[in-house]
Image (cartoon, rainbow, N blue to C red):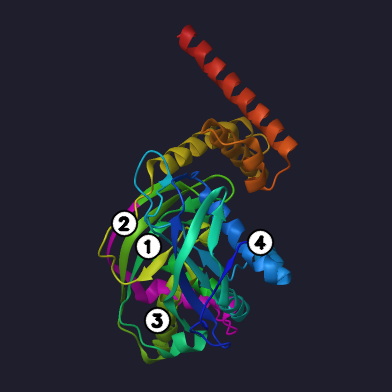
Amino acid sequence: MPPRRLPSSSPPWSASTELVGVELSLSPLRDCRLYPEYAIGLHAWFLDQVRQNNPELSAFLHDDPAKPFTLSRLVGLPFAHTLTALAHETYYWTITALNQPVCQWLAEWWLNRPAQLELRGAAMQIVDAKVIYPPTTYVDLLNNSISSTALSFCSPTSFRHRGHHLPLPLPKTLFQSYLRRWNDFSGEVVDSEDFLDWIDEFVVIARHQIESLKVTAGKRGSVTGFVGSVEFHLLPLGQRETEYAELFGALVQLAPYCGTGHKTTFGLGQTRVGWLTAAPDPIPPIERLAAQRITELTELFLALKKRQGGHRAINSAETWATILARRELGESLKVIAVDLGIPYETVKTYLKLARKALNDTQAEDGKMIHKD
């Protein structure tokens, strides 16, 4: 039986809206144990909601590399050694839409949204939904003045850089991330090289308060990211820089909608305008433990696969590491296979290969210790 849906008043945005952010208030029906990679489940639930009344849009969102939406992780989870959502407590989940088709779908969904969110056996009531980032358009962002040049990063934020993670809020890197979304969805493409050269010359960091940490993210591997706040300062501008200064202001305002860096559809890079007055929601220890274990195993397997080289070796090592680490934490192979989008028998084979590689390495290390 399909889940009951809640009738609602009309959404507070029009058909011309290109950007909007909503927050769902969720309350578990009973205490439920979550797994460190639960953001994969939130991602899958969202795409399934889209699929139910717009299969073409769902397929596009799944396959296209330019993702016109972001999803947060659950805010408010207890900081404990087990990742448990407590019955009748309230947790918060943010969805943003970055183009007109997704805004329109979200408006239709808002009118008849489900009563519950199902997260791999964890049933959560949707007790409330509200707009937290006002409906707007890209043109409106460009025409509005900004009141703050500070940005706060509320979930781990990182960038892809030469095959690695870059956990630093360098102005050029940050605004390259925002400009990419602007060029993807605004309909007004800006010359990236020229604008980013301008950012490099005229935008500096006035102050910051950040820390780095490692988390699981996406379907495989781990990410080293940063959280905290950064304030920017514009150096004195000449007349010809006015246009880029306006775009700079628009991109600051765009940041909460589009998020920052990569894996923003799996909860990373959640961004707010202004200086963060409270500490970001802490990453539960079990998530940090899972991320650290995946990193350790990835480095081990990558060393064994070094003859392969390139992205193929990295992808293979991360896949083995993710499967083995999640199995060590007690997750079933069937669930892991579904999350990774890999056939169950293939996951079983990878697990055997990973365990054998780990055991062989440990045996070799034991021989070396004994020899010494």
Return the disc, 3 or 4, that comes first in the chain's sequence.
4
Residue drawn where x is 47% and y is 74% of the image: 21
Which image quadrant for residue 251?
bottom left
Q: Position of residue 155 (x, y in %)?
A: 41, 57
Which span of residues is magenta-colored? Answer: 182-211
Drawn side of residue 49 relative to residue 178, left or right: right
Q: Which residue is mark 3?
A: 249
Q: Which part of the image, by quadrant, shows the C terminus?
A: top left
Q: 10 Å neighbourhood of mark 4: few (<14), some, or many (≥20)?
A: few
Q: Which residue is mark 2?
A: 210
Asked if residue 85 is positioned above or below residue 292 in the image, the reply reads: below
Return the disc, 1 or 2, that comes first in the chain's sequence.
1
Q: Which mark is residue 153?
A: 1
Drawn side of residue 143 relative to residue 185, left or right: left
Return the disc, 4 or 1, that comes first in the chain's sequence.
4
- 60 or 112, which is in the foreground? 112
Residue type of the residue flagged with mark 2 = Ile
Examine the structure image and report whether residue 197 is included in the region drawn in magenta.
yes
- 21 or 224, which is in the foreground? 21
Contact flag, marks 3 and 4 (Cβ < 8 Å) = no
Q: Which mark is residue 2?
A: 4
Q: Which type of secondary structure does the marked residue at label 1 adopt? A: strand
Asked if residue 372 is positioned above or below residue 346 in the image, the reply reads: above
